[in-house]
Each structure stands twice: as structure tokens, then as C-alpha cells.
């Protein structure tokens, strides 16, 4: 199977090179370079769109998140056995923030099913929502009293990242304050703050 994939990629590359040479000989230089830029840029644009949608897919559709305001992630590789840690911050619209403030836990207890959940697998699915402050459990490094620290969760397994100090302070305040909501997924922890109009997703492993 790997040989078939390699041969397919090689033939595709040969076809692209042949097309570029043909275009270089047959069309004006200005059009040639425009086409070349489009050929190079298109896969990058497609990948960026896919990457953005993938990062947003961990948020339940009902929260209507459509952008990311901060990301810091790091991985030691791919597949089983690799280590990773990360945090993503998403803006929450005033409309949804007001709905959450008005309904409280009822909002999260009646979240509708996400679209394309089967394709998303575990992403965006959370079974048990709770009110903050986040309670210390097996997911956090054990400590005696005091507030939970963001790095105690993200660096739980010894693989760590450097997060902007402002984000650390904001996230630490949210997980230790009342009036916010959180849930653990198959991978990661999501916290929703209607007062700050933010959704925070963090993971370790």
C-alpha cells in the first residue's frame, strides 16, 4: 500500500512539473507566474482552513465559536506514544454569553448534538458539565490548598509549553472563580466564561 501511495505521489509530481514546463513555454510570463503562485498558495490556504476548522471542532457547536484568539501548542511527534500539550482561547459572542448567564447550568445540560459528530469522533463531545471553580482531581498535579495553577494541568505529564503571561493569568482566574462552566472530554478540558466572553480549551498528554 505504501508503494502505491509513493508511486501516486511521484506521478502527481511529474504531472505538475510537466504542466509547469508546458505553461512556461506556451503562455506569457506574467500569467505564468500568477498561475505558479496560485498553484503554490492553494495547498497552503486549504491546509490553513482545515487546521482552523480542526482546532475549532473541539468546541460544541452550540457555543457558535468561529475564530481563535490565541493558540500555543507543542507535540513531540505523531500517533500513539507521542507527547503533547496545548491551550487555545476562543472569543465567545455576547449573544451566547448572555444566554449562558441567563440559563446557567441548564444551558449546558441541554446542549444539542454537534453536526458531523461521527467525523469529529471525540472532538466537541463533553458528557458532564460542572460549575467553576474547577475541582482538583486526578487530572491535576496534587497540591495542598490554594488555587489550581494552569501549568499544573498542562504540564501534568512533564511535557510543557510557554504560554503568554496574560493568558496564564486570565485562564487561572477563570478556572478558580465562580460563574464559569467546565467539562472534561476524552482529551482535554474546556472552560466557558460568559463574563469574560471566552472559551478556553487545554490539554496534556
Image: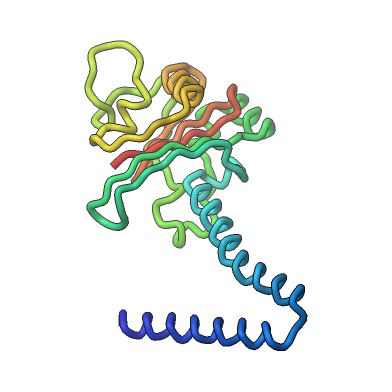
On the image, which quarter does residue 146 sit in? top left
Q: Position of residue 5 (x, y in %)?
A: 38, 81
Q: Is residue 198 above or below residue 45?
A: above
Q: How many tags in the picture?
A: 0
Q: Position of residue 182 (x, y in %)?
A: 44, 31
Residue at (37, 81) in percent of width and height = 6
Q: Position of residue 165 (x, y in %)?
A: 46, 23
Q: Is residue 113 above or below residue 107?
A: below
Q: Is residue 144 left or right of residue 192?
A: left
In front here: 173 or 155?
Answer: 155
Q: Is residue 123 left or right of residue 147?
A: right
In front here: 196 or 32?
Answer: 32
Q: Is residue 125 left or right of residue 36?
A: left
Residue at (53, 36) in percent of width and height = 70
In front here: 148 or 20?
Answer: 20
Q: Is residue 48 above or below residue 2?
A: above
Q: Is residue 82 left or right of residue 55?
A: left
Residue at (52, 45) in percent of width and height = 60
Residue at (45, 38) in percent of width and height = 72
Amino acid at each position: 500500500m505504501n508503494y502505491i501511495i509513493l508511486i501516486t505521489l511521484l506521478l502527481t509530481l511529474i504531472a505538475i512539473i510537466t504542466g509547469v514546463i508546458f505553461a512556461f513555454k506556451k503562455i506569457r510570463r506574467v500569467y505564468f507566474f500568477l498561475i505558479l503562485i496560485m498553484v503554490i498558495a492553494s495547498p497552503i490556504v486549504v491546509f490553513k482552513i482545515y487546521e482552523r476548522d480542526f482546532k475549532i471542532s473541539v468546541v460544541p457547536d452550540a457555543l457558535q465559536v468561529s475564530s481563535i484568539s490565541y493558540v500555543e501548542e507543542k507535540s513531540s511527534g505523531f500517533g500513539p506514544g507521542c507527547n503533547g500539550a496545548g491551550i487555545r482561547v476562543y472569543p465567545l459572542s455576547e449573544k451566547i454569553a448572555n444566554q449562558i448567564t441567563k440559563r446557567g447550568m441548564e444551558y449546558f445540560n441541554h446542549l444539542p448534538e454537534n453536526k458531523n459528530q461521527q467525523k469529529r469522533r471525540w472532538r466537541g463531545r463533553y458528557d458532564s458539565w460542572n460549575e467553576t471553580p474547577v475541582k482538583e482531581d486526578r487530572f491535576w498535579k496534587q497540591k495542598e490548598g490554594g488555587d489550581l495553577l494552569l501549568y499544573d494541568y498542562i504540564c501534568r505529564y512533564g511535557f510543557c509549553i510557554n504560554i503568554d503571561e496574560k493568558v496564564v493569568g486570565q485562564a487561572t482566574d477563570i478556572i478558580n472563580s465562580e460563574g464559569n462552566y467546565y467539562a472534561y472530554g476524552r482529551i482535554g478540558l474546556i472552560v466557558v466564561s460568559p463574563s469574560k466572553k471566552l472559551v478556553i480549551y487545554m490539554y496534556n498528554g
